[in-house]
Image (cartoon, rainbow, N blue to C red):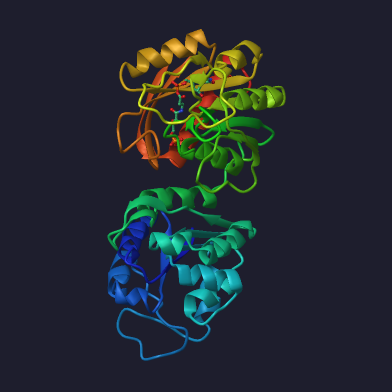
């Protein structure tokens, strides 16, 4: 495919060179458009050398140095000849221009003239990303047909702050572009029920017990299933990440509420995936008033919560049931134990005592344990890529179990 790669003027512009390289490795041709501010961060010659294409740097004809080419109608040509428009990094300024149809430069003009799929990979300071104006522009673009957004990662940013706003990894961007460029429809006709996030078990009207689940793994599964044509029902505990568009959301708080929601949706589902980190215990007799602090030790009486996965295992019929196992040791043995005791068809095991994978991370590394006896190690990758691998194996497993894809 011919990909127009728009590069915005942020410190992450240098990573766009790696994105271009990854796209070319995947067989695409890349036509780079550098905004004026992007040229403050990276030279056109870098991309010209990488892509073998002249780099577009301006809207109107100008004396073109060796590695650049621009003309007043070039943007129409790029828009007509490109199969996909990727903007990485997409700055707050570019998102605002795209959302409001402003076109003062080559890239925003090309955006308006382009009618194919658009992939936006934002990158900016955390405060800028979380500003209501940026979030409003993102919401507009997310709802626009043919637009896909790769949410920025969280972590240490170039400006020295820590938080959301870091450009997604180049390989994740390239994989995402491929998924958009070559949409798969192998989950069409499926209704997939997914749970995600933590539950909150009240201690009193003010306090609760919870865990570190961010919801990212479950939400990535929901996006992957949606993009492959499924109807997706996502039952989620309280999280702080954006809801995937085109997915039916059910919000719950406690394990009991999650159980009720799962059982209400179970019969309609063909595949059930339990990625939520459900509390194993809840407080017995939650007081109506806030527990007052005292010098004395506070003891809690905790009872087990309903084991939703086990109950789904008893009721699943010929539905495909996929559980998760969050372990700190004995991963495969524990995953297999859960597979057998809860009548799952697959359990996705992941170690959660690592900062780079598991809870809250954008990455994960899993072991798929299947009822056929097979075990598949999936190396560390973005949760969205892991989600696609889980569905690939789930369909293969169902074929092996029920003879139906
Ligand atoms: O949300 P992220 O930040 O992206 O982190 C992802 C994750 C680490 C939460 C996810 O990959 C994961 O491991 N989810 C399962 C967490 C968990 O509760 O694992 P567990 O081994 O304690 O539970 C085993 C299975 O039983 C899970 O499918 C769980 O959903 C289910 N369960 C657990 C308790 C309960 N009362 N009812 C259940 O259905």
The quarter of the image holding the C terminus is top right
* 126 and 34: which is toward the camera: 126
Answer with the quarter of the image where residue 144 lies. bottom right
Check the image and report above or below for 363 versus 317: below
Provide residue 82's location: percent of width, then percent of height.
52, 66
For residue 119, side relative to residue 41 (left or right)? right
Where residue 88 appears, x then y in whole percent? 42, 62
Q: Is residue 259 visible?
A: yes
Q: Nearer the viewer, residue 36 or 255?
A: 255
In the rendered view, would you say 387 is above or below 270? below
Please determine whether, in this image, residue 137 is positioned above or below residue 60.
above
Q: Which residue occupies 36% across, 57% down? A: 19
Residue at coordinates 49% horizontally, 19% vertically from top-left? Answer: 281
Where residue 209 appears, as percent x and y from the top left, is 47, 29
Query: Foreground residue, 180 or 241?
Result: 241
Q: Is residue 280 left or right of residue 160?
A: right
Residue at (49% x, 9% y) in the render: 340
Q: Position of residue 62 (x, y in %)?
A: 40, 90
Does residue 26 appear in the picture of this structure? no
């Amino acid at each position: 495919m011919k990909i127009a790669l728009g590069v915005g003027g942020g410190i992450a512009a240098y990573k766009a060179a790696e994105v271009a390289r990854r796209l070319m490795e995947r067989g695409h041709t890349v036509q780079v458009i550098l905004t004026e501010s992007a040229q403050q961060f990276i030279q056109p010659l870098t991309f010209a050398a990488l892509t073998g294409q002249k780099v577009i740097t301006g809207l109107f004809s100008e004396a073109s140095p060796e590695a650049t080419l621009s003309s007043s109608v070039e943007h129409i040509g790029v828009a007509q000849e490109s199969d996909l428009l990727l903007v990485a990094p997409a700055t707050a300024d570019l998102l605002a221009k795209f959302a409001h149809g402003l076109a003062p430069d080559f890239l925003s003009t090309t955006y308006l003239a382009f009618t194919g799929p658009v992939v936006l990979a934002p990158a900016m300071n955390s405060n800028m990303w979380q500003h209501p104006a940026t979030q409003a522009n993102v919401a507009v673009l997310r709802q626009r047909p043919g637009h896909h957004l790769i949410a920025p990662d969280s972590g240490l940013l170039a400006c020295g702050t820590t938080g959301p706003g870091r450009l997604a990894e180049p390989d994740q961007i390239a994989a995402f572009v491929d998924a958009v460029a070559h949409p798969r429809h192998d989950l069409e006709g499926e209704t997939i029920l997914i749970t995600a996030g933590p539950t909150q078990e009240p201690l009193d009207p003010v306090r609760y017990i919870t865990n570190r689940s961010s919801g990212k793994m479950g939400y990535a599964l929901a996006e992957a299933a949606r993009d492959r044509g499924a109807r997706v029902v996502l039952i989620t505990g309280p999280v702080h990440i954006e809801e995937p568009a085109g997915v039916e959301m059910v919000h719950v708080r406690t394990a009991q509420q999650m159980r009720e929601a799962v059982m209400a949706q179970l019969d309609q589902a063909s595949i059930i995936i339990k990625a939520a980190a459900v509390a194993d215990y809840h407080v017995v007799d939650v007081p109506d008033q806030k527990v007052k602090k005292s010098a004395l030790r506070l003891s809690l009486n905790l009872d087990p919560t309903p084991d939703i996965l086990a109950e789904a295992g008893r009721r699943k019929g010929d539905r495909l049931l996929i559980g998760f196992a969050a372990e700190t040791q004995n991963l495969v043995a524990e995953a297999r134990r859960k597979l057998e005791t809860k009548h799952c068809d697959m359990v996705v095991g992941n170690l959660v005592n690592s900062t780079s994978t598991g809870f809250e991370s954008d990455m994960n590394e899993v072991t798929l344990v299947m009822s056929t006896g097979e075990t598949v190690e999936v190396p560390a990758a973005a949760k969205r890529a892991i989600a696609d691998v889980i569905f690939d194996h789930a369909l293969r497993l169902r074929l092996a179990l029920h003879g139906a894809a």
